[in-house]
């Protein structure tokens, strides 16, 4: 049955369904000999790598394995059966093969990604290596780029665990020499991935609870008219969505956006960020993607038609992006990105302060505190160096000494320690001179064993002595208070989250990126504002406080603002929203009541101000301005 609810508003570019329709409409050139197409394959152009032969020829095991992984990352066939695609595919695979086969040393592996960048990516100033040129589109994919950017040590370790390029006879011999590996042989391949970071666990909601103002008459539904009144420039739906799913998504998102406008005390049409924002339901997502913001097309995407309670998170990314454009910090992608950029002075002061309090705090340290901290640190360092010194002495102490020999040995060791002022950091490494007391111990070692202490072991004795002596030297005490920057708990928790879990989606962001810190903090801010207003809306935000976990030591880690930090960040969000209103980016809500009545016979105030035609004209004009010219970088921000 044909769906009745269809896309409305301005057309939103970039949807996969539009690409498929476009490809289906373009007739492909006829191929006279289909056999030619069947021969244009990866395995014919670049046969499987023979690891044993490469290793026998002197290629390191890790490099040989890396070559095969790069080959396997290439698509096995051209995507299209036209002559141009086949020629491009053949030439690109052949060029990549030649480049890879020229790499014979581990140090050369990293140069391959540079080769891909300069050969197959556009290098103009506007796109900054984000577009693949026409010739490479059938070959250069995300898998190949990921393999090209992986550190060489990863391939080296995998190759060793897999016994890559090792014959069965040699593999059996190696296992016989190292019996403990036999038990792990069967699980060799699976063990490669046993230590991989896992995605952060996020629960999926089957339904959404809401308790708040009624923006629609009982039993009423939303459509193009309501979203046009909010200034949303376009709405699209995935091909799989039914009318019931589409209507549910529209109703839920409409209530969520109005609840957000209510708690921020902004005009309802401001929720569309100047009429630039679009919505996508059930499209553009991948796998288990929740709500995310696609900056390239300025659209909030709810891939499964429900958003999974991250609409506020995605709207925060849109706001971050919109502030950056409004303040003219382009071509930098967003306000949060610009805060680390030389043009950060263009951002409003409230935005800079907000981004600052999410990351670091400044503390004053008095001279007395500096002295105490220095003494504590130096004492700890001295104790560590004492241990290293004792271990170095123990490593060269001869066995089975007589009591007289032991006495002479202990006396020589004590002389080394008592004369630690002779120790110099360059001794035995940079200079040709040795430490006289260590040289005396070496001669005593020769008398007892017949040979001197090796040079590298003499250096291991001398090196910690230098730091022990430095820790004991007098220094000028500080006389003034200094400032010190310390990471906030929110940032340190996010760093630990980033170490323990992979990026949660397939888009290029990590939990420690400032744009992601901004979005998670805003999600918490919205959750707190809803609670203060006595409103519950799980479609808008349902997982703001979920980013809490325990590390391997059982310590509770918070990758969200908590306690006094949360109060401070929420205050800074209040200040930022107020300044956005003063700058005209947002506007103070004119009506005090929550309820927005819907009379389908008489347009509301919002509808009178902004029609669909008005929105289209505004957006068309703004897109021509330099302030809103966007680099076509394809980046997205998501939860």
Image (tube, rainbow, N blue to C red):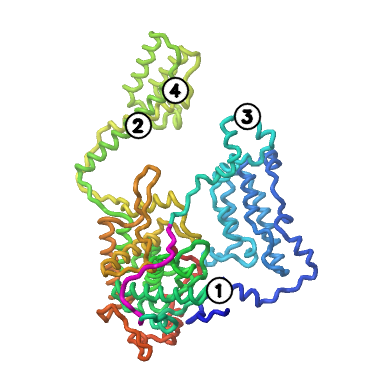
Q: Residue at x 34, y 28 (%)?
A: 386
Q: Are marks 3 and 2 in contact (CB under 8 Å)?
A: no
Which mark is on residue 97? none
Above or below: residue 213 compared with residue 463: below
Magenta stretch in the rendered image: 202-217
Outermost bottom residue: 601
Is the residue 122 above or below the residue 220 in the image? above
Q: Which residue is mark 3?
A: 176
Residue at 47% x, 25% y is: 455
- Tag 2 or tag 3, which sits nearer the N-term? 3
Helix, strand or loop at disc 1? loop
Residue at left 43%, top 11%? 401
Residue 492 image point, x, y percent: 35, 51
Q: Which residue is mark 1?
A: 239
Q: Position of residue 617 (x, y in %)?
A: 44, 85
Q: Mark 4: which secondary structure?
A: helix
> In this rendering, is residue 255 above or below 402?
below
| Marks 4 and 3 in Cβ contact (< 8 Å) | no
Please name which of the two marks, 1 or 2, marks the residue nearer to the observer. 1
Q: Residues within 10 Å of mark 3 (few under 14, many from 20)?
A: few
Q: Pointer 4: residues within 10 angstroms few (<14), some, or many (20+)? A: few
């Amino acid at each position: 049955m044909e769906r009745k609810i269809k896309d409305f508003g301005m057309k939103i570019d970039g949807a996969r369904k539009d690409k498929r329709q476009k490809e289906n409409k373009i007739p492909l050139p006829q191929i006279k000999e289909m056999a030619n197409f069947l021969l244009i394959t990866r395995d014919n152009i670049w046969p499987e790598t023979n690891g044993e032969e490469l290793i026998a020829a002197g290629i390191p095991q890790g490099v040989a394995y890396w070559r095969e992984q790069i080959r396997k990352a290439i698509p096995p066939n051209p995507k299209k059966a036209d002559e141009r695609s086949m020629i491009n595919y053949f030439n690109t695979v052949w060029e990549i093969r030649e480049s890879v086969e020229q790499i014979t040393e581990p140090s050369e592996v990293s140069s391959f990604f540079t080769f891909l960048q300069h050969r197959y990516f556009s290098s103009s100033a506007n796109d900054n290596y984000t577009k693949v040129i026409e010739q490479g589109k059938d070959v250069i994919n995300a898998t190949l780029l990921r393999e090209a950017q992986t550190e060489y040590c990863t391939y080296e370790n995998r190759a060793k665990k897999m016994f890559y390029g090792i014959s069965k006879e040699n593999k059996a011999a190696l296992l016989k020499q190292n019996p403990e590996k036999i038990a792990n042989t069967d699980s060799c391949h699976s063990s490669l991935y046993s230590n991989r970071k896992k995605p952060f666990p996020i629960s999926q909601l089957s339904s959404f609870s809401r308790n708040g103002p009624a923006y629609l008459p009982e039993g009423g539904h939303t459509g193009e008219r309501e979203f046009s009144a909010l200034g949303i420039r376009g709405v699209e739906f995935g091909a799989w969505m039914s009318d019931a799913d589409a209507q549910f998504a529209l109703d839920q998102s409409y209530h969520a956006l109005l609840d957000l406008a209510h708690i921020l005390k902004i005009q309802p049409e401001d929720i569309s960020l100047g009429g630039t924002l679009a919505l996508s339901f059930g499209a553009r997502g991948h796998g288990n993607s929740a709500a995310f913001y696609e900056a390239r097309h300025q659209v909030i995407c709810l891939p499964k038609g429900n958003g999974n309670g991250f609409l506020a998170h995605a709207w925060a990314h849109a706001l971050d992006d919109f502030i950056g454009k409004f303040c003219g910090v382009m071509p930098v992608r967003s306000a949060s990105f610009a805060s680390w950029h030389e043009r950060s002075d263009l951002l409003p002061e409230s935005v800079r302060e907000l981004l600052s309090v999410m990351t670091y705090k400044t503390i004053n340290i008095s001279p007395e505190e500096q002295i105490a901290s220095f003494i504590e640190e130096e004492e700890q360092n001295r104790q560590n160096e004492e241990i290293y010194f004792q271990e170095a002495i123990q490593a060269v102490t001869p066995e089975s000494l007589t009591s007289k020999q032991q006495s002479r040995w202990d006396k020589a060791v004590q002389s080394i320690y008592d004369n630690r002022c002779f120790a110099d950091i360059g001794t035995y490494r940079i200079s040709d001179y040795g430490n006289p007391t260590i040289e005396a111990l070496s001669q005593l070692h020769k008398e007892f064993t017949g040979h001197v202490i090796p040079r590298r072991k003499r250096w291991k004795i001398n090196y910690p002595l230098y730091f022990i002596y430095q820790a004991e030297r007098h220094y000028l005490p500080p006389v003034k208070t200094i400032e010190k920057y310390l990471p906030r708990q929110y940032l340190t928790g996010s760093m630990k989250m980033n170490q323990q879990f992979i990026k949660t989606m397939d888009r290029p962001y990590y939990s420690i990126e400032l744009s992601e810190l901004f979005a998670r903090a805003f999600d918490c801010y919205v959750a707190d504002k809803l609670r203060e207003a006595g409103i519950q809306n799980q479609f808008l935000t349902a997982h703001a406080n979920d980013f809490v976990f325990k590390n391997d030591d059982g310590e509770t880690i918070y990758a969200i603002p908590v306690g006094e930090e949360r109060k401070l960040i929420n205050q800074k969000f209040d200040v930022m929203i107020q300044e956005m209103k003063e700058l005209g980016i947002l506007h103070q809500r004119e009506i005090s009541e929550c309820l927005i009545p819907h009379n389908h016979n008489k347009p509301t105030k919002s509808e009178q101000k902004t029609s669909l035609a008005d929105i289209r004209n505004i957006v068309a004009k703004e897109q021509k301005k330099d302030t809103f010219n966007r680099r076509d970088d394809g980046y997205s921000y998501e939860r």
